[in-house]
């Protein structure tokens, strides 16, 4: 935060939010397709 | 294995997510007061909308099953609950990561955050209930009734920021944010929506296959 009170930092939170989101999307989609293929559901 | 339409929806969602995220970071302006953490909006708000839509699909499936006892509605309940819990948990994590740099804390027991926690826990409980009941008819009926009750809280999640004093802001409208921010938000809204459709549809096929095997035994 600079002297005006305007936020200038916080990129680490942005990286964490997007990183976790992309990992969750990819992991859950991968998990679903693997399970669907294993159970011959596709 | 055939290439199914939901796989196309998932791929389209991933492409849109890449475009929307690029637009949000490279084109949309930096928010004046929050600074970089505002960029979390482009993933957090679309996840919230898709989570609420997913649990709305659970509600539709529950009413459908109780009305005409067709298994397709029970498959929808099973598929949308699991997807909704995954997206709802992700939503809470994204929110905490946005809350820390803007509010100074990861979590607060305010109406929106508390009702989201209740939402995720209640649908997790219904998913656990489904795992404990062996009889498919009882399982479908009980989870449909429980899901209708749980949906009352989903409506509350959406409206509580208007009704109650909350640390969480009320819903933004295109009139209150920059046009480029709206574009990034809309692209990612469709991106996460298509990913959610892909998840529910794939999980639906698994639920249908499992039930057919269960009924054969």
Image (tube, coloured by chain):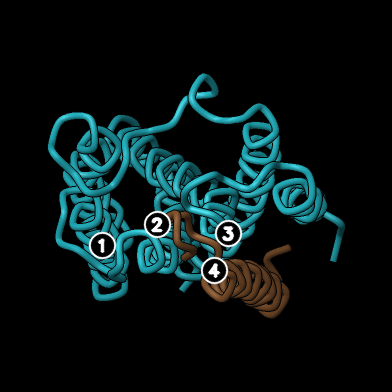
Q: Residues within 10 Å of mark 4 (few under 14, many from 20)?
A: some
Residue A33 as seen in the image, left or right of residue B96: right
Q: Which residue is mark 1?
A: B126
Question: Is B67 above or below relative to B77?
Answer: above
Spot occupied by residue A8 in the image (x, y as percentages of width and height): 55, 62
Say which label, 3 or 1, has the lower sequence index.
Answer: 3
In the image, what residue occupies the spot 53% across and 50% down? Answer: B41
Q: CA distance from mark 1 to mark 2?
A: 8 Å
Query: Between residues B120 and B105, which one lies in front from this camera angle?
Result: B105
Q: Which residue is mark 4?
A: A9
Q: Nearer the viewer, mark 4 or mark 3?
A: 4
Marked residue chain, label 2? B
Which numbered circle lies on residue B81? Answer: 2
Spot occupied by residue B71 in the image (x, y as percentages of width and height): 44, 47
Q: Which residue is mark 3?
A: B36
Tell me the cyan chain: B
Query: Between residues B23 and A36, which one lies in front from this camera angle?
Result: B23
Q: CA distance from mark 2 to mark 3?
A: 33 Å
In the image, what residue occupies the spot 40% across and 50% down? Answer: B77
Are circles 4 and 3 on residues that touch, CB within 8 Å?
Answer: yes
If the image is split into quadrants, where does the N terminus of chain B sit? bottom right
Marked residue chain, label 1? B
Spot occupied by residue B18 in the image (x, y as percentages of width and height): 79, 55
Q: Colour of chain A?
A: brown
Q: Secondary structure at mark 4?
A: loop
């Amino acid at each position: 935060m600079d002297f005006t009170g305007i936020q200038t930092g916080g990129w680490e939170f942005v990286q964490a939010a997007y990183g976790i989101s992309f990992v969750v999307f990819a992991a859950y989609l991968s998990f679903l397709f693997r399970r669907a293929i294993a159970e011959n559901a596709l | 294995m055939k290439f199914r339409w939901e796989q196309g929806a998932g791929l389209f969602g991933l492409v849109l997510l890449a475009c929307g995220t690029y637009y949000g970071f490279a084109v949309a302006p930096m928010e004046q007061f929050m600074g970089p953490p505002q960029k979390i909006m482009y993933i957090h708000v679309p996840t919230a909308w898709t989570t609420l839509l997913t649990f709305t699909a659970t509600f539709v499936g529950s009413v459908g099953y109780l009305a005409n006892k067709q298994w397709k509605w029970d498959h929808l309940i099973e598929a949308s609950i699991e997807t909704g819990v995954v997206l709802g948990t992700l939503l809470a994590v994204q929110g905490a990561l946005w809350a820390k740099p803007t509010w100074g804390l990861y979590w607060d027991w305010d109406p929106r955050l508390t009702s989201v926690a209740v939402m995720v826990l209640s649908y997790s409980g219904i998913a656990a209930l489904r795992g404990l009941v062996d009889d498919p008819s009882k399982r479908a009926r009980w989870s449909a009734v429980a899901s209708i009750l749980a949906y009352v809280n989903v409506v509350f999640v959406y409206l509580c920021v208007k009704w109650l004093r909350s640390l969480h802001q009320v819903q933004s409208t295109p009139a209150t944010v920059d046009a480029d921010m709206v574009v990034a938000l809309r692209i990612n809204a469709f991106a996460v929506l298509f990913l959610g459709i892909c998840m529910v549809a794939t999980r639906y096929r698994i639920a249908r296959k499992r039930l057919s095997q269960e009924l054969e035994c």
